[in-house]
């Protein structure tokens, strides 16, 4: 089904988030777990880890969730964590858009080539309580719920 694939959502979301965060100098990790943050170089003091969550193509518009974890080391008050969180949210805003939401190209694999089939935007954010990992890395979990429409 064109415009409604989990692969298309995952690639579109990851590519946009990674590119936008890298442009801001924020380290990006695509990981299914936070159980071993020793995989992240200890010289990196802040980063964002993401994985795809719930996916609903029966709703209109379609929706998909990216589970984002903002992680910071040596940040007992959480101020750096808050800064990274604000930077993450900032990549989804567009003050020139009538609703303030940045439109992100939704791309899918078609005949071995990635083609744009629609647009997606951040529809809502569900933030959970922050917590600390065993090594005192602060984690702020957030579900980023995206909506998209096909423009074929």
Image: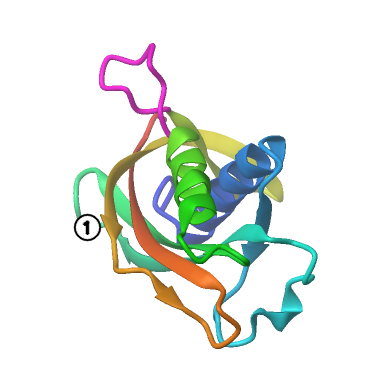
The residue to which callout 1 is attached is: 58
Q: Which residues are magenta?
A: 92-102
Q: Residue at x 58, y 42 (%)?
A: 16
Q: From the viewer's perspective, is 32 left or right of 46?
A: left
Q: Nearer the viewer, residue 24 or 32?
A: 24
Q: Farthest residue toward the front? A: 77
Q: From the viewer's perspective, is 38 left or right of 48?
A: right
Instruction: Report whether residue 58 is seen.
Output: yes
Q: Residue at x 55, y 80 (%)?
A: 34
The vertical placement of 62 against 73, above or below, is above
The vertical placement of 42 against 116, above or below, is below
Residue 129: quadrant of the picture: bottom left
Q: Nearer the viewer, residue 70 or 50?
A: 70
Residue 110: x and y in percent read 61, 46
Q: Is residue 100 magenta?
A: yes
Magenta stretch prevailing secondary structure: loop
Residue 120: x and y in percent read 40, 38
Instruction: Report whether residue 52 is seen.
Output: no
Q: Nearer the viewer, residue 134 or 94?
A: 134
Q: Residue at x 48, y 52 (%)?
A: 79
Which secondary structure lies at badge 1?
A: loop
Residue 89: x and y in percent read 42, 41
Residue 31: x and y in percent read 60, 73
The vertical placement of 81 against 52, above or below, is above
Q: Nearer the viewer, residue 149 or 27?
A: 27
């Amino acid at each position: 089904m064109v415009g409604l694939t989990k692969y298309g959502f995952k690639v579109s979301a990851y590519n946009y988030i990674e590119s936008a965060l890298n442009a801001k100098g924020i380290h990006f990790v695509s990981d299914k777990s936070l159980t071993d943050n020793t995989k992240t170089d200890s010289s990196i003091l802040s980063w964002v880890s993401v994985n795809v969550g719930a996916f609903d193509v029966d709703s209109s518009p379609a929706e998909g969730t990216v589970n984002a974890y903002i992680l910071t080391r040596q940040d007992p008050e959480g101020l750096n964590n808050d800064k990274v969180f604000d930077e993450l949210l900032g990549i989804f805003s567009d003050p020139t858009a009538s609703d303030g939401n940045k439109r992100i190209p939704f791309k899918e694999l078609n005949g071995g080539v990635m083609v744009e089939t629609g647009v997606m935007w951040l529809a809502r954010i569900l933030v959970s309580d922050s917590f600390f990992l065993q090594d005192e890395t602060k984690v702020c979990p957030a579900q980023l719920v995206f909506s998209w429409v096909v423009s074929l």
